Image (cartoon, grey):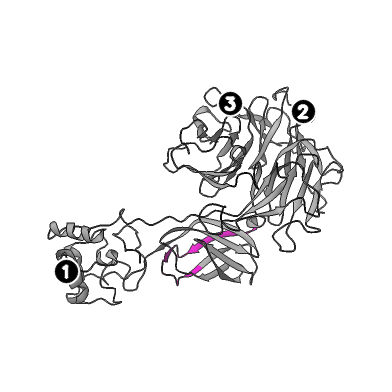
Amino acid sequence: MFRSLFGWLFLFGVGSVFSLQGMIGSMLFAGSPSLMVADSSRDHLVHLQDLDSDGRYDGPGEASIFYDSSAAGPQLSVPTALIATSQELLLLDGGTLDALIALQDLDGDGTANGAGEVRILYDDDSAGPDLVVPISMTLEREGRIFIADRSTTRRHVLLLVDQDGDGDMDSPGESSIWLQRDGNPQLSDLFLPTAVLHIGDGQVLVADASNSWIYRCQDLDGDGIVEGDDEVVPWFTAGTENSILTVDAMERRSDGSIFICDEDLGTVLHLHDLDANGTISDLEVTHFIDGQSPYSSVQAPRRLFSLPGGALLIGEPDQDGIFIAEDLDGDGNANAIDEQQPVYIDGGELLPSVAGISLVPGPLSIHIDQITPQLVDRDGGNLLLIEGGGWAPGSAVQLRIAGLQFPANAPINTLITATLPELPTGSHDLTVIINGQDHFVPSALQAVPYFLRGDVDASGTLSITDAIVLLEWLYLPASEPISCLDAADLDDSGSVQLTDAIVLLSWLFASGPSPAAPHPDPGPDPAQNGPGCIDP
């Protein structure tokens, strides 16, 4: 291929321009964060890890049981929701158990099946309202938990708070009915909460299955309940253009917008309060996934999980798996070809009915502020610096990039260091594993060729030989190919031509301007827009 391109170049003679930008593209290597997934048919929890960084969870050893019927703790009946905290995994069970429980892998065996690894936080024996059909929960940063109970005899949202600091919410005064039909005539007579979502500043979205509306609720007077037109406000009202039968799940995106899904209609809507008026108009609604689209792989979205960067994971019971949806073409939806892809489908062996998706316990305590360098040498050897916090000095740290897992060091509580191995050319996600807990950073770095501008023959120094090699390559069809055309692009114009040889000769013999960076030391092309280097 390259020889024919060189011959084509020669036909144009002096002053011809050659650029491989866009022709030699870098491969994009994806990754996905480790997940905990609840299944309501198998009544167990599954730990998914993308060990090979291919963006899926179907490789060897990537799916394992975290909690099942062999556990020393209570037997799950119908798990309905999951939330990861810095230490534990919160699980809501809405079957015969009707409980909120916390799970933690204390012995490091990869499961929570051991003795003492499960605690009951709230159940029917607690001093508070009974749970009948708890279906959804959301966690406030301050530790308050909101639970939607969709039983026809309850129809309310509970608020749980660990006031005495004993780790549970079963004492008097630690649970209360936060939202109900009484005192809120603006709610439907058949008000039936199906999903709750905390959105910040004490505000919680509550979805009502009776009319497919979503209410924005906030305890403005601090009396512990939301009541009245000012505290329970319609936020989204499904219209004819944005019809939806039931809000089965809600998920907040990093930009503050909200995804909601309707399993029966096969629809995921994207709601964004662009004018910040506290309500969603028809113009602020996008059909992110339309099950009727010819390119839609998702048919029955039941559970949602938002990934960093804007992609969405979708639990799909009709196909026994999990899909990822992403707006790749920038049109505001994920209905085009290749914008919906399966990340886990096993024929119903482990996950026939996904009922909850969360991160693994731990990531919420870790924050990554800066990663340097972001342009790393694909041949390896760079010292990677990860600045942030949430770990202790001397913690056991591993990094995973492009399916490679290697050790790192945490010399202080704000820094992690590692020497990078050889990596495939392209953008890479990073998983930081600290004391067995994962933290996922999308598009953390890019592996690129390191070169010395002007070192056309790759000898490590600049000399007249480099100018000769460049001129031969430009005008002699039988000349040897140049392995890194970026090195021959002396002025970093994005193309290789006669003027580059002139720049090099002028610098060597006439005190002319020096070549563009990287020079005088090897490094990456700062702009990443040159003709490129051939992959070794």
Q: Residue 329 location in percent, x, y? A: 41, 41
- State the residue at coordinates (63%, 32%): 247
Q: Residue 398 location in percent, x, y? A: 58, 67
Badge nearest the viewer, 2 or 1: 1
Q: Earlier in the sequence, mark 2 or mark 1?
A: 2
Task: Return the mark for residue 286.
Answer: none
Would residue 350 appear left or right of 418 to someone viewing this image? right
- Callout 2: helix, strand or loop? loop
Residue kind at label 3, given as amino acid type: Ala
**Residue that numbered label 3 is attached to:** 238
In reply to whether residue 372 is colored magenta, the answer given is: yes
- State the residue at coordinates (57%, 38%): 259
Would residue 94 appear left or right of 62 to someone viewing this image? right
In reply to whether residue 468 is colored magenta, the answer given is: no
Q: Residue 453 location in percent, x, y? A: 29, 69
Residue bounds of the magenta highlight? 365-384
Q: Earlier in the sequence, mark 3 or mark 2?
A: 2
CB contact under 8 Å: marks 3 and 2: no
Residue kind at label 1, given as amino acid type: Glu
Gap in Å between the C-alphas at discs 1 and 3? 69 Å
Gap in Å between the C-alphas at discs 3 and 2? 22 Å
On the image, which quarter does residue 24 sit in? Answer: bottom left
Taking depth in this image into account, of 406 and 249 the one nearest to the observer is: 406
On the image, which quarter does residue 242 sit in? Answer: top right
**Residue that numbered label 1 is attached to:** 472
- State the residue at coordinates (25%, 76%): 462
Badge nearest the viewer, 1 or 3: 1
Gap in Å between the C-alphas at discs 2 and 1? 83 Å
